Amino acid sequence: MKSFRELIPFLRPYRLAVFMAPLLMLVEVAMDLMQPRLLEQIVDRGIAQGNMRLVIQTGLLMVGLALVGAVGGVGNTFLAVRIAHRSGADLRDALFARVLDFSFGNLDRLETGQLVTRLTNDVTQVQEVVLILVRILVRAPLLLVGSLIMGVLTSPRLALLLLALSPFILGLLFWVIARAHPLFAAVQERLDRVNTVMQENLAGVRVVKAFVRSAYEQTRFGQANDALRDQTIQAMQLMALVMPLMMLFVNLGVVGVIWFGGRMVVGGQLAVGQIIAFVNYLLQALFSLMMVGMLLVRVSRAAASADRIVEVLHSQPDIQDRPDAGDLAQVQGQICFEDVTFSYNGQAQPVLQEIRFSASPGETVAILGATGSGKSSLVHLIPRFYDVKAGRVLVDGVDVRQVRQASLRRHISVALQEAVLFTGTIRDNIRYGCPDASEEEVIAAAKAAQIHDFIVQLPEGYDTRVGQRGVNLSGGQKQRIAIARALIRRPAILILDDSTSAVDVETEACIQEALASAMANHTRIIIAQRISSVVAADKIIVLDNGRICGMGTHQELLATNPIYQEIYTSQLGNGVKQHG
Ligand SMILES: Nc1ncnc2c1ncn2[C@@H]1O[C@H](COP(=O)(O)OP(=O)(O)OP(=O)(O)O)[C@@H](O)[C@H]1O
């Protein structure tokens, strides 16, 4: 329930509607409460005394009151819908913004499927409960208290019956609510699992097909789906008990009233119309109790969802700007690693140790090393995707932790190892790096990335639509568009993380040449697996198991560094001979 309190601020913008809705409901309830009394009049004073005028007049009054009540009810529902759906949309926005705020570290730990459930189904649960709350939270207690008072006024002795039934009904409600919360929390977890498996499969459906693993994946999905089904059935079976049991109490109440009331009528202590009115009040009171019951069950279900929403809203990004962080205005592109040690969250073993090097504007620094040696981890520290465990990373002499992330990243372009493109045109994808870039700038970036010629021979050129995640492009084409996207910002620091791995050696050389001239005064960091990609660099850093085991030019390393020599020898004949 604490989580609900945390979500109340989302209702604040709609406080006028939140204030008006109960007033409208008050109108509906007041009208509902008058009806049985009028019915009593029709029976006892109209029908019993043969006064047809009174019957018609009272009947018309009942219709009029019902119409007024309907206006109140419809008005309340209109407001309820607006409050629930608007605050729900705001909540989704807030969650989405929070997810975008997460650091790489947060994202490593979160499953996408879980996030999807929280942003969709969990928000819907809370939204629906707000909708019901605005209607029932006001209606049910008002109707309950109103009916009890009117019931007592109609016949105090029969009202004792109601009192006797109450403990059973309340006991049932509390029992259901206590059990419902954990059951529904488990339902949401099972739903997470279904979404995670589904999301993983949709993203990797080609791998599944290539390895003929459809049957295995079907089983995996089936298990998650069955678990969701069983858990939901268990929870819903509990809910299914509520209605019939409540109805049983209602019917017992009606039978009791007719039994005792009938005897009172026979004894002349009560009129027939009073029994009818009382049964009506009894039904209204018990139905409003049932509504409260259903509401509480829904609330306890939504509380499980609210907990999960609040958990996301409250997760703090691992990496945050310091309160005193300044903006990095002009950047030359000087990078300096001072004794940097780094490990991923929760892992004792450092991935990088005692990293010391610098890169200056105009320089190309290449990082070479076996797979898993820590190359990507190293470059991720420059835009502060992760924080160092010890040492410092400086850009233009300033510790990257002392400046606002956005201002730091504005000066750094990273073409990540996996070239992720978005749906849209090729132009949109290149411009993603710099939304106000002109057509000439788009073309210049594409030319430098050696992708312009390919784009212009497409029937729709730069307007060609890129399919989801770039399905209609080859790996090398995607990589080159991603490089153009990084280049178009003309960043002070350009980082290419193995971004030409799917590009042939010749094209790669052209890209490097274009970069050297277009980005002559900028700092370029290039991660590569192939020696051919690094020979021309001003400085090559050889990484081995998270440590720098050699640094220098190609010639220097070839002469002195055994690991570099080993890599060189193993790749000989792979288009590098001419450089050797
Ligand atoms: N997000 C992560 N969380 C935990 N460990 C990670 C993460 N990313 C990488 N690692 C680990 O850190 C080590 C270095 O990985 P990194 O990706 O930096 O290597 P790399 O040299 O770039 O490899 P490759 O050439 O294959 O891309 C690896 O042992 C890897 O398992």
Image (tube, rainbow, N blue to C red):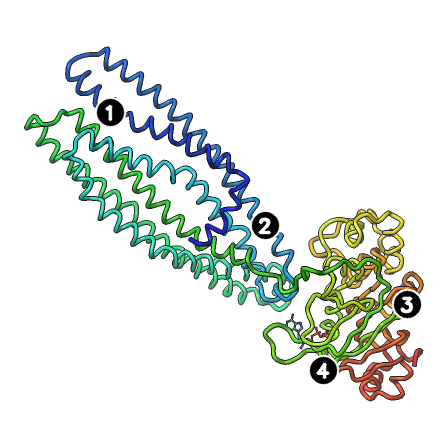
Q: Earlier in the sequence, mark 4 or mark 2?
A: 2
Q: Does the CB distance between marks 3 and 2 fall below 8 Å?
A: no
Residue at point 77%, 68% (across, down): 497
**CA distance for labels 4 and 2:** 41 Å
Nearest to the eye among marks 4 and 1: give it. Answer: 1
Q: Please tell me whether mark 1 sits on a helix, a strand or a loop.
A: helix
Q: Earlier in the sequence, mark 4 or mark 3?
A: 3
Looking at the image, which is closer to me, 388 or 324?
Answer: 324
- Residue at the spot of label 3: 362
Q: Earlier in the sequence, mark 3 or mark 2?
A: 2
Residue 376 % position (x, y): 73, 71
**CA distance for labels 1 and 3:** 91 Å
Which dot marks residue 468? none
**Toward which corner of the image does residue 28 lie, by quadrant?**
top left
Vertical placement of residue 240 versus 394, above or below: above
- Residue at the spot of label 1: 37
Q: Please tell me whether mark 2 sits on a helix, a strand or a loop.
A: helix
Q: Does the CB distance between marks 4 and 1 fall below 8 Å?
A: no
Left or right? Give the position of 526 relative to 133: right
Vertical placement of residue 405 versus 530, above or below: above
- Residue at the spot of label 4: 545
Q: Amino acid at mark 1?
A: Arg
Q: Amino acid at mark 2?
A: Ala
